[in-house]
Image: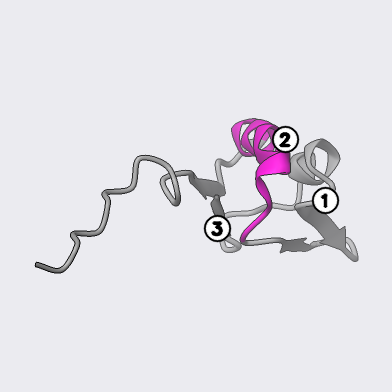
Amino acid sequence: MRVVVDLSRCEGYAQCAFLAPDAFRMHGEEALMYDPNPDDAQRDRVLRAAAACPVQAILVDQSEGRDAPAEASPS
């Protein structure tokens, strides 16, 4: 799972930090710090946090490792 936050869009509501504190945290009053590659154990919390963001500043890419095309074997 890969997480990207559009920090120019983030308004510091901190809903993500409440819902997934191991992946998101507020530094000071306005700066959001986040783990760009949270482990799979946090998947549900991160997805809930992204859905709860009032400005939809969190993008979650779940395709990594899931349904990825198999590499062709050399012939």
Determine which quarter of the picture holds residue 10: bottom right
> How many residues crowd around disc 1 within 10 Å: few (fewer than 14), some, or many (20 or more)?
some
The reply to whether callout 2 and callout 1 are in contact (CB within 8 Å) is: yes
Alpha carbon separation for disc pair 3 and 1: 15 Å
The residue under the point 15% across, 68% down is: 74
Q: In the rendered structure, which disc, 2 or 3, sits on the residue that comes first in sequence?
A: 3
Q: Quadrant of residue 55?
A: top right
Question: Which residue is depicted at the point 72% across and 41% down?
Answer: 41
Amino acid, disc 3: Val
Q: Which residue is mark 1?
A: 22
Q: Which quarter shows the C terminus?
A: bottom left
Q: Between disc 2 and disc 1, whose residue precedes? A: 1
Residue 42 lies within the magenta run: yes
Residue, x 57% and y 48% (percent of image)?
Answer: 58
Q: Magenta residues?
A: 37-52
Whole-angstrom CA distance, mark 2 to mark 3, is 15 Å
Is residue 67 placed above or below 23 in the rendered structure?
above
Residue that badge 3 annotates? 4
Q: Amino acid at mark 2?
A: Arg
